[in-house]
Amino acid sequence: MNEEFNKRWEQYNNGEMNEEEMMAFEEELEENEKRLSQELNDSDWTDFSISPEKQKAILQYGKRKSYLRISVLAVISTLIILPLCTLGSYLYYGVGGAESKGNHFMETAAVTVALTKPNVAIDMKDLKGQVKLFGMNTELKLQKQIGNKTEAIGSEQIEMFFDKLKQPTISYYGDSSRDTEDFFTHPSTQADASKKQTLTTLDKLPEGTVSEVYVSYDKAYTPKDVYSFAKKYDMKVLWNAIKTEDSLSGNQRPIGFPGRDSEFLKELQHTSKTEVDQFKDALTYVNQHPTWAKTISGRPELDLSNRIRYINQNGVTIYGSVITGPSKEIEKFVKTKRIKTAKVSEVELWNW
């Protein structure tokens, strides 16, 4: 019988039995285990007459059964805990509607881009977000306006863990990755040769083109003054660089707000408020999440609190604008004495 049992045990252990044979053999092992337990309980002595092979088989069966129980418990725990944690993530980012953390993040991202990237905005109709375990991944589509046309220029992927943001991954199409914030000249800075170069470029452009040009003024003007002398030309003011410091220091770069002719202003605009009030509100709103704003903009020097303080003390004045329109009309505007420096950013075929 020992030889027969050993043979069957080897087949069982090596997985050579079919399902019915395995079930029958396991029932036999379980019966032997119960019989041994009963004999030990009914006797005050230990019977060592069970063969070593059978003892080994019983122990192996017990181990298998324990491993199976542990594995089943682990799988059940995972299936229960993971959905609960994911549901918790949805609630963490979604509860509260307009006041939810997810909505605050989206609005902060949209306003931050509008403030820190000249003539660039997030396409609010094409937002892609995915809630994951304890976090959220978001893809923001970036677009800009040239002439009467709005076009996609790239995307920004942001990964969030609870309320902490990882460094965004920004992908641009074509030449859109140029650091256009450096196209402006602060009133405290001397003029360079860019105006002359820009006029040469605009002069060579054909009639059937529209241009996007960054202009800096000879001084900071009120919004009313800027729009007053800009309306004399067939062009659009898309973005304004706002003076928020007496002089630039270190790696400071301008902030601003979409101009009155920008298509992007419509998504941020509150009709009951002036453009100046909207700009102040936007700064105050973004400053509620300064770490988010610095990460989204990629600008650790943003320093919104001091910029807000300066504006409250000195008012809102404009020292540069992004303008677009027929290239020859833009050329006329750049020739005026009010323009200190100018740089051509993009040129498109006629879409005016």
Image (tube, rainbow, N blue to C red):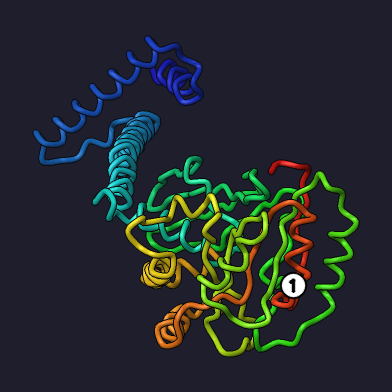
Foreground pick, 164 / 31: 164
| 172 in relation to 34, above or below | below
Q: Which residue is mark 1?
A: 336
In the rendered image, which quarter contains the N terminus? Answer: top left
Disc 1 on helix, strand or loop?
Answer: loop
Question: Whole-percent x and y of residue 336?
Answer: 74, 72
* Any part of residue 216 in sight: yes
Query: What residue is rendered at 50% in x and 71% in y?
Result: 224
In the displayed structure, does residue 112 sit left or right of residue 146?
left
Q: Residue furthest front?
A: 232
| 237 in relation to 126, above or below | below
Question: Whole-percent x and y of residue 60?
Answer: 38, 34
Question: Whole-percent x and y of residue 249?
Answer: 63, 88
In the displayed structure, does residue 135 sit left or right of residue 142?
left
Query: What residue is rendered at 28% in x and 43% in y?
Result: 84
**Residue 292, quarter of picture:** bottom left
Foreground pick, 52 / 19: 19
Q: At label 1, which amino acid type do we have?
A: Thr
* Any part of residue 55 in sight: no
